[in-house]
Image (cartoon, grey):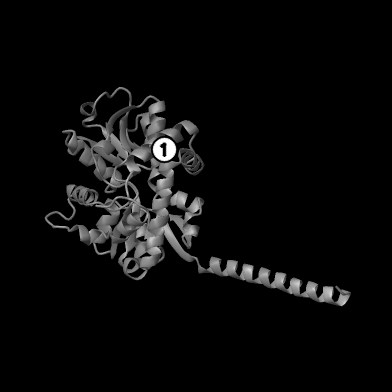
């Protein structure tokens, strides 16, 4: 082989390598640009939104062609942002989101993160039963929200009248401090605060989740997204459901996520994993029972009374049902 011939072969090879690199990075850039950018709001950093955090941190959204920004917002602000299009989805299904739909916000529940709540009424040690708490103060994080209506339903379920208790709204940090300094006699807590309360000697008087089959977390979408961004919504739900399944099946990955995101120690993370496994089992398809419980809770508060509310008015389970089938879940 002559030197001239070798030089020509080398030049051709170099051109091919450069071309390959350019094509590779162009394709990589295109794939990144092709990811759909969306915003999802969430109410707080707690067990309710574990699937959302997992889908983002484990890059499940990316694997489904989504570039997701998650933003913490109070429920009222999230409803307004959904109406204006500033966010695309709300990570949550509960009394606030359903009430917004019934008041005219064009939206529906489309996916369930869980089918039962993780709330407990924790009282100061001197109170040994709910009867002892009558006329006393029970603190919770928001009147009219999931925690409030769930407490009232659970009290009725065990034969107590919610009107016999003084229910007060406090910020989450004030619940524990209120218990400790006697500012309140009891508090409705979810994880991880309920575990810390037990460690400090406070007494659990009511496990709300055993009496209220209401979803905790989930996904609410605008009607426009359901109708016009169906493929995108399908990918969002698929990502969340895969994340939820992984959280249930891989204890070590789940506990690592819980410890890093919610900032708890391993012992508490272990308890939170067990609670999440109990409450989050399911195919993600919104149920009639869960949505009816939310409606009942709103009517218990005097809202939408006398109004017949159809499941389809507040829920669209079609995409979640299709995704569940694709992922191999049994769907009724």
Q: Where is residue 277 in the image (x, y as percent from the top left)?
A: 37, 39
Whether residue 45 is visible here, answered yes or no, is no
Residue extending farthest to the right is 3
Q: Name the one closer to the observer, 66 or 12.
A: 12
Q: Which residue is drawn at 37% across and 62% down?
A: 234
Left or right of 256: which side holds 318? left
In the picture shown, does residue 325 fall above or below 226? above
Residue extending farthest to the left is 306
Residue 326 sits in quarter: bottom left
Whether residue 290 is visible here, answered yes or no, is yes
* Residue picked out by circle 1: 273
Q: How crowded is mark 1: few (under 14 residues within 10 Å), some or many (20 or more)?
A: some
Q: Name the one closer to the observer, 80 or 326.
A: 326
Q: Residue at x 47, y 62 (%)?
A: 66
Left or right of 214: which side holds 240? right
Secondary structure under badge 1?
Answer: helix
Residue 83 sits in quarter: bottom left
In the picture shown, does residue 220 fall above or below 138? below
Q: Position of residue 270 (x, y in %)?
A: 44, 34
In the rendered image, the quadrant that contains the N terminus is bottom right
Q: Where is residue 16 in the image (x, y as percent from the top left)?
A: 71, 72
Q: Name the one closer to the observer, 268 or 324.
A: 324
Total marks shown come to 1
Q: Where is residue 127 in the image (x, y as percent from the top left)?
A: 28, 24
């Amino acid at each position: 082989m002559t030197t001239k011939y070798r030089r020509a072969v080398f030049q051709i090879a170099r051109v091919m390598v450069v071309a390959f690199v350019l094509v590779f990075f162009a394709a990589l850039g295109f794939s990144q640009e092709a990811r759909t950018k969306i915003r999802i709001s969430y109410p707080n950093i707690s067990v309710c939104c574990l699937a959302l955090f997992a889908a983002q941190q484990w890059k499940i959204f990316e694997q489904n062609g989504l570039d997701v920004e998650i933003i913490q917002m109070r429920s009222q602000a999230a409803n307004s942002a959904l109406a204006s299009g500033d966010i695309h989805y709300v990570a949550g299904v509960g009394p606030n989101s359903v009430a917004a739909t019934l008041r005219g916000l064009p939206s529906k529940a489309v996916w369930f993160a869980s089918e039962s709540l993780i709330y407990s009424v924790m009282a100061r040690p001197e109170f040994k039963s709910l009867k002892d708490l009558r006329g006393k103060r029970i603190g919770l994080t928001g009147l009219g929200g999931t925690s409030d209506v769930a407490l009232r339903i659970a009290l009725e379920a065990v034969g107590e009248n919610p009107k016999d208790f003084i229910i007060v709204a406090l910020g989450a940090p004030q619940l524990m401090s209120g218990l400790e300094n006697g500012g309140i006699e009891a508090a409705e807590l979810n994880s991880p605060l309920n575990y810390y309360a037990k460690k400090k000697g406070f007494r659990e008087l009511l496990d709300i989740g055993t009496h209220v089959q209401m979803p905790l977390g989930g996904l609410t979408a605008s009607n426009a997204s359901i109708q016009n961004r169906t493929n995108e919504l399908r990918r969002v739900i698929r990502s969340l459901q895969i994340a939820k399944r992984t959280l249930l099946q891989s204890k070590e990955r789940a506990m690592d996520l819980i410890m890093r995101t919610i900032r708890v120690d391993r012992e508490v993370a272990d308890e939170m994993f067990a609670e999440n496994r109990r409450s989050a089992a399911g195919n993600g398809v919104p149920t009639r029972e869960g949505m009816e419980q939310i409606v009942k809770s709103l009517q218990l508060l005097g809202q939408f009374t006398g109004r017949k509310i159809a499941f389809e008015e507040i829920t669209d389970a079609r995409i979640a049902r299709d995704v569940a089938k694709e992922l191999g879940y049994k769907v009724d």
